[in-house]
């Protein structure tokens, strides 16, 4: 085995038992929805357009929230770059996101018994893996040293399935069995960030994904709950500036490349 790729869709939330692989490395690409990858000492939250790396012999388990779709890739260690000895998020670029969107669309329209698109998918995957060589291990993922409290899962599901800047904790307090203040404290203790920042980040990540797919900013603003295009543009431009600044700082940090090895 050098490379195996499959797409899985999850209607209800599913969780795999802890396990590890001693003969292949693994990648999970989130087409839509959300996945929470867990090791013995940390949890990583990944949303649409993000790629999770799992090295050899690394004990892990994955919880996939409802209405999510993932590409699961198994690869011989010499078939793709080795990014890190810890599980984490791998960067993606616009071409990779577009290619994976095409692969997912082909899979959705293909009869499960007749894989008429296998040759096309093979060529798309070749492009994806060629771009993968240019990517890097990321240290700025949504990480927590604790198990993610189950009361937060419906909120995270809502934010990833249908992100909306107006979404509030009050909408979930009765369903989750905790006050909005308690839920916010859980976000802070889990991710070191309050709900408002997590919501803003997930909404902007969705905007970034839609923008790279060529969706007009007016449509994005409406879809994400903004009252005006100017309010969305201000928030999105600031997000892009922060993203560019972080990337530049990482590029000029002599320790960054050492930490990724």
Image: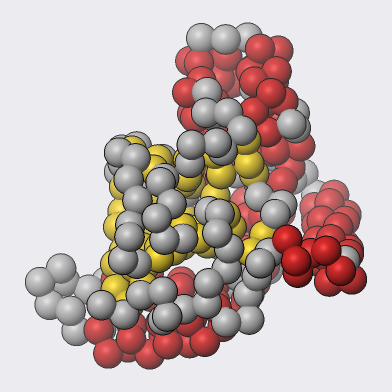
Where residue 12 sits, quadrant-wise, is top left
- Determine whether 134 is above or below 27 in the image: below
Residue 50 seen in the figure: no
Nearer to us in this view, 261 or 108: 261
Q: Percent x, y for residue 142?
A: 64, 44
Where residue 205 sits, quadrant-wise, is bottom right
Query: Which residue is pictured at 88% across the width and 66% down the height?
Result: 253
- The C terminus, quarter of image: bottom right
Q: Is residue 78 left or right of residue 6?
A: right
- The N terminus, quarter of image: bottom left
Q: Percent x, y for residue 129?
A: 48, 82
Query: Which residue is pictured at 57% across the width and 14% down the height?
Result: 173
Query: Which residue is pictured at 83% across the width and 71% down the height?
Result: 251
Q: Is residue 191 left or right of residue 114?
A: right
- Determine whether 180 is above or below 2 in the image: above
- Determine whether 147 is above or below 140 in the image: above
Query: Which residue is pictured at 66% across the width and 12% down the height?
Result: 182
């Amino acid at each position: 085995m050098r490379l195996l790729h499959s797409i899985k869709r999850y209607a209800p939330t599913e969780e795999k038992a802890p396990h590890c692989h001693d003969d292949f490395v693994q990648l999970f690409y989130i087409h839509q929805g959300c996945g929470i990858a867990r090791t013995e000492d940390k949890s990583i939250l990944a949303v649409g357009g993000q790629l999770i790396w799992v090295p050899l012999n690394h004990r892990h388990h994955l919880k996939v929230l409802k209405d999510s779709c993932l590409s699961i890739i198994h690869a011989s260690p010499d078939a793709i770059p080795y990014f890190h000895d810890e599980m984490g998020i791998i960067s993606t670029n616009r071409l990779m996101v577009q290619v994976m969107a095409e692969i997912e669309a082909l899979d959705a329209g293909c009869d499960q018994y007749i894989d008429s698109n296998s040759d096309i998918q093979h060529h798309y995957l070749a492009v994806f893996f060629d771009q993968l060589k240019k990517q890097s291990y990321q240290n700025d993922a949504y990480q927590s040293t604790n198990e993610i409290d189950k009361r937060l899962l419906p909120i995270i599901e809502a934010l990833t399935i249908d992100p909306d800047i107006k979404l509030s904790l009050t909408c979930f307090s009765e369903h989750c069995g905790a006050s909005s203040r308690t839920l916010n404290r859980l976000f802070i203790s889990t991710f070191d960030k309050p709900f408002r920042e997590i919501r803003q980040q997930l909404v902007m990540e969705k905007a970034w994904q839609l923008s790279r797919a060529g969706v007009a900013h007016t449509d994005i603003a409406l879809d994400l709950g903004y009252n005006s295009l100017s309010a969305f543009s201000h928030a999105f431009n600031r997000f892009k500036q922060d993203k560019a600044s972080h990337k530049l700082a990482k590029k000029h940090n002599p320790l960054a490349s050492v930490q990724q090895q």
